Amino acid sequence: MNHDLYLIGVDGGGTGTRVVLGDTHGRELAQATAGPSGLGLGVTNAWQSIQTACAEAFGHAGIALDWSRCVLGCGLAGVNNRDWLAAFRAQAPNTAALAIEWDAYTTLLGAHGGAPGVMVALGTGSVAAALSADGDFRAVSGYGFPSGDEASGAWLGLRLIVHAQHAFDGRGPMDDLAHDLLAQTGAQDHDGLVVWLCEANQTAYARLAPLAIEHRKNPFVARLLDEAGVEIGKMIAALDRTGKLPVALCGGLGAPLRDYVPRVYQRRLREPLADSAHGGLYLARLELERLDGR
C-alpha cells in the first residue's frame, strides 16, 4: 500500500459538506465542514465547497494540501443524474484516485460499518438503502425535491410554510409556530412571503425543519411528524420484508424523528456506527485497495 497518500471521505448534501481526512495507516487526522455540495445546486459550487472543506481539514492537520496525493471517496446527493456526475468528474482536481457514489451508499457504509443493514437518511433530503447478507445493495426514495424526499427537512419545511400562508390569510391561527416561520423567512406581509417562496430551494425549506421539532406539540406539527414517521416505516418495509435487518436512522433529523417511527420497527432501530463522511473514508480505502491490487 502506498503510504505517501492521504484518504479523504466526503459527505456532500444540500445543506453542507463534511470531510474526514485520514492516512493509509487507518488514523483519522482531521475533520472539516463547508457549504452545500449536492450536485443539484451546481457542480462548480459542489467542488468549491469540497475544496474549501479539504483545505481546512489539511490545515487542521498541519499538512500541505497536494491533490496528487489524495484518494477521495465521495458520497454525493445528485450523482444519479448522469450529466451532473460527468460534469463533476470533468471539474475534479488531479487526484491520485476519485471514487464517487450516491450518498445513500456511503451513509449505509458508515451506519453499519459495511455490514448488512437498513439505513434511512433524513437530512435536507431523504433516502433509504439496505445491504443484504449477500452484498446486494438496494435503495428506495431519494427522488429529490419537491416531489420526493419524504420525511426530510425540505419535505417538512415545504409543509410547514403552508401553516404560515394560512395564518397570513386568516385561514389558520397566527400562533407561535406561524410567527417563528415568518421570522425565519423575514416576510412581513403576503407579498414578502411570495418573494421568499419564489426564491426558496430545498436548502431554504430544510432550514425551517428545526421549527417542527421545537413546536412538536402544535397540533398541525404533531400530525406532520406522525406522517413523517409513517413514511419512514414505508421505506423500511420496502427494503427488508423479512423484518430482520437492523435499522439506523441517519442525518440531522434521524434522532429527532426516531420516536415517530411506527412501533413495529422500534425494536430494530440501532444507533449508526458512523456518518456518511466516514462511509466516504471507507470508500476511499476500498478504492486505494483496488488501485494497489491492479
Image (tube, rainbow, N blue to C red):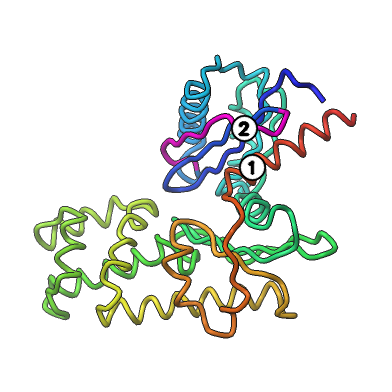
Q: What SS does tag 1 mark?
A: helix
Q: Give the mark count.
A: 2
Start-end of magenta stretch: 24-37
Residue toward you, 14 or 218: 218
The disc label shown at residue 8, or none:
2
Instruction: Please tell me whether residue 7 is drawn above or below residue 267 in the rendered image.
Output: above
Is 288 on the left or on the right of 187, as rendered? right
Q: At 58% from the left edge and 66% from the top edge, which residue is drawn?
A: 141
Which residue type does callout 2 highlight? Answer: Ile
Q: Is residue 206 visible?
A: yes
Tell me if residue 143 can be seen. Answer: no
> How many angstroms separate mark 2 from mark 1 (CA)?
7 Å
Circle 2 SS class: strand
Which residue is at 14% across, 65% downward?
A: 179
Of residue 25 and residue 292, the one placed in the foreground of this image is 25
Residue toward you, 191 or 214: 214
Cβ atoms under marks 2 and 1 closer than 8 Å: yes
Lower position in the chain sequence, tag 2 or tag 1? 2
Query: What residue is disc 1 on?
Result: 280
Residue at (60%, 67%) from the top-left corner? 270
In the figure, residue 234 lies in which quadrant?
bottom right
Label 2: few (<14), some (14–19) or many (≥20) C-alpha neighbours in 10 Å = many
Q: Residue furthest bottom?
A: 264
Left or right: residue 191 versus residue 32 is left
Q: Amino acid at mark 1?
A: Gly
